[in-house]
Image (cartoon, rainbow, N blue to C red):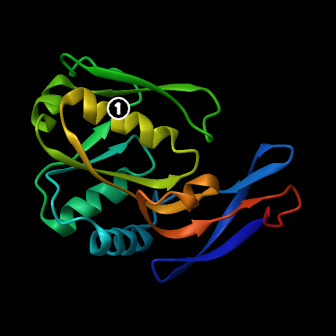
Amino acid sequence: MKYRMNIAGLDRDLPLCKVSDDLYIGAFVMFGDAEITVACARELLARAPKDYDYLLTAEAKSIPLIHEMARQSGAKEYFVARKGLKVYMPRPLHVTVRSITTQHDQDLYLSGEEADKIRGKRVLIVDDVISTGESLRAMEELVEKAGGTVAGRMAVLAEGDAQARKDIVYLNKLPVFNADGTVKE
């Protein structure tokens, strides 16, 4: 089963993936799709607040998006909250998150060097899809722990309860689905 939608002016068929017996989600994966990545970055930047210092996302699916946003905006640097602690990450900051797509606790890390750069700065948080808001909350916590301020929250798609949030700028609503592929009401 697939769900066809228009994202940033481009049509895409999203495969429907089972989360539970009565809940399916549309899988939006930007990896390998340069056309959608460029278009989404352009559309998000057009709606982004003008006063931010850095971009931040969580590993991994939104890395192409944040890279393209940095490239288009002329940003020299952006940050990725890593899902695993690396030996090259001195004095790491750490938070735990439970995402709908992983269905278990997940750790996010920011190196102490990155945290030093964020201190006193305004950070724009970017994600591909915001659903429960847990990944977003974890990134906000990392920014706060680093001493920065969240300048805004952006995503390509908002799913479920995230669609009602007024603090998130997103391009499209992504419905959730029943087992038969119909949109949940």
Which residue is found at the position 64% from the left and 55% from the top?
160
Choose between 131 and 89: the one closer to the eye.
131
Depicted 63 relative to depicted 1: above or below: above
Choose between 153 and 72: the one closer to the eye.
153
Does residue 92 appear left or right of residue 12 in this picture?
Answer: left
Which image quarter is the N terminus in?
bottom right
Depicted 133 relative to depicted 94: above or below: below
Which quadrant holds residue 113? top left
Which residue corresponds to mark 1?
A: 141
Percent of width and height locating residue 3: 71, 70
Does residue 39 appear left or right of residue 71 in this picture?
Answer: right
Percent of width and height locating residue 158: 54, 60
Does residue 13 appear left or right of residue 115 in this picture?
Answer: right
**Residue at the outermost bottom position:** 9
For label 1, the SS is helix
Does residue 74 appear left or right of residue 156 in this picture?
Answer: left
Q: Residues within 10 Å of mark 1 (few under 14, many from 20)?
A: some
